[in-house]
């Protein structure tokens, strides 16, 4: 029998606790501390940040508090690549990711459907080996839905045509028991006032559900998001699947958490929902 190919945790003990008991307690506390109102309609996608839990944990928890009200079989995570550039989009080629909470299996059947779109979407290790933007989402998924599978997608290049191609492919293969997750932080290392101003534009693009305007705001540097392409791809796919409402659930900066306002990172949690029945 062929041995499973498992991607081990790369940032546990750094971005989130390595001890399973402490990690469970941390996530449960973050989820319990969120007062997220019911969002009308069916949740098709969320945006969640990917910094250390000490900084962006409350924001991520807002997205997952909403998501735990929704049953799903597979979480499709779209993330940027922080550590290696490559031309295209990489779907993890292995069988599972490991976190301190155990294995989370890759949805191999869904991966094969996505890989049928030849060209920029390939199956590989590229972007997955040390990338934290997928990994930090997984413990939250494991706590709210222990039986869920995952499809980890890393964008080595977030140019607009790649975002649209990925969105089209996802919209064509996803079923109602899948959820989309865009992993992204917002602006980086500005003072608080500048960060708030730049992040406001991205939040407005999200609530207006304007993915092309979001990409334009990023390209002209009016706004910033390290996973802006992931947000645009997920938003576009969600729209094709019926989403007609964008809602910001939580927004802050690292300065709001630490009190250090001279050099902050922005975070947002959001949801794309459909008022139409399944």
Image: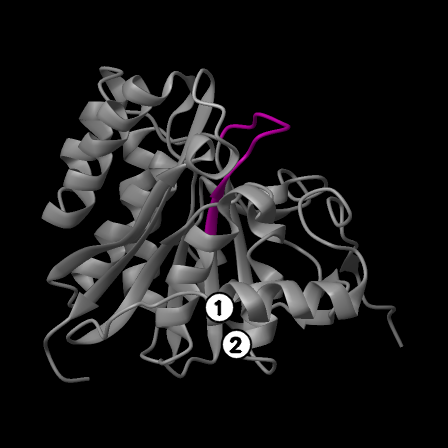
- Residue at image position (75%, 62%) is 98
Residue at disc 1, secondary structure: helix
- Residue at image position (32%, 40%) is 163
Within 10 Å of disc 2 (Cα), the crowding (few <14, some 14-19, many 20+) is some
Would you say residue 266 is visible in this rendering?
A: yes
Picture layout, residue 137 above or below residue 11: below
Overall secondary structure of the magenta stretch?
Answer: loop
User: In the image shown, does 233 or 62 lie closer to the viewer?
Assistant: 62
Q: Quadrant of residue 271?
A: bottom left
Residue 233 relative to residue 154: left or right: left
Q: Which residue is mark 2?
A: 144
Measuring from the top left, give residue 100's x and y in whole percent: 77, 64
Would you say residue 107 is visible in this rendering?
A: no
Q: State if disc 1 and disc 2 touch (CB < 8 Å).
A: yes
Measuring from the top left, give residue 153's x and y in whole percent: 51, 50
Residue numbers of the magenta segment: 78-87
User: In the image shown, does 139 or 104 lie closer to the viewer?
Assistant: 139
Which is in the foreground here, disc 2 or disc 1?
1
- Residue at image position (42%, 52%) is 59
Asked if residue 36 lies in the magenta stretch, the reply is no
Picture layout, residue 133 above or below residue 109: above
**How far is the residue under mark 2 from the one under mark 1?**
9 Å
- Residue at image position (79%, 56%) is 18
Image quarter hosting the C terminus: bottom left
Q: Which residue is mark 1?
A: 31
């Amino acid at each position: 029998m062929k041995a499973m190919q498992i991607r081990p945790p790369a940032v546990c003990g750094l971005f989130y606790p390595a001890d399973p008991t402490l990690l469970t307690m941390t996530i449960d506390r973050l989820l319990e501390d969120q007062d997220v109102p019911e969002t009308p309609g069916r949740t098709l996608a969320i945006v969640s940040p990917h910094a250390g839990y000490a900084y962006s944990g409350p924001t991520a928890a807002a997205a997952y508090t909403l998501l735990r009200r929704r049953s799903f079989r597979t979480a499709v995570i779209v993330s940027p690549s922080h550590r290696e550039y490559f031309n295209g989009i990489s779907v993890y080629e292995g069988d599972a990711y490991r976190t301190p909470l155990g294995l989370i299996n890759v949805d191999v059947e869904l991966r094969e459907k996505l890989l049928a779109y030849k060209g920029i979407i390939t199956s590989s290790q590229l972007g997955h080996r040390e990338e934290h933007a997928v990994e930090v989402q997984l413990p939250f998924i494991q706590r709210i839905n222990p039986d869920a599978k995952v499809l980890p997608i890393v964008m080595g290049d977030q140019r607009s045509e790649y975002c649209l191609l990925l969105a089209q492919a996802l919209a064509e293969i996803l079923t109602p028991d899948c959820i989309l997750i865009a992993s992204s932080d917002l602006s980086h290392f500005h003072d608080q006032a500048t960060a708030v101003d730049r992040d406001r534009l991205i939040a407005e693009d999200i609530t207006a559900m304007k993915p092309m305007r979001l990409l334009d705001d990023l390209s002209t540097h009016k706004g910033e998001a390290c996973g802006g392409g992931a947000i645009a791809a997920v938003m576009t796919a969600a729209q094709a699947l019926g989403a007609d409402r964008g809602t910001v659930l939580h927004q802050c900066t690292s300065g709001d958490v630490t009190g250090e306002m001279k050099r902050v990172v922005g975070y947002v949690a959001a949801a794309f929902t459909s008022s139409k029945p399944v």
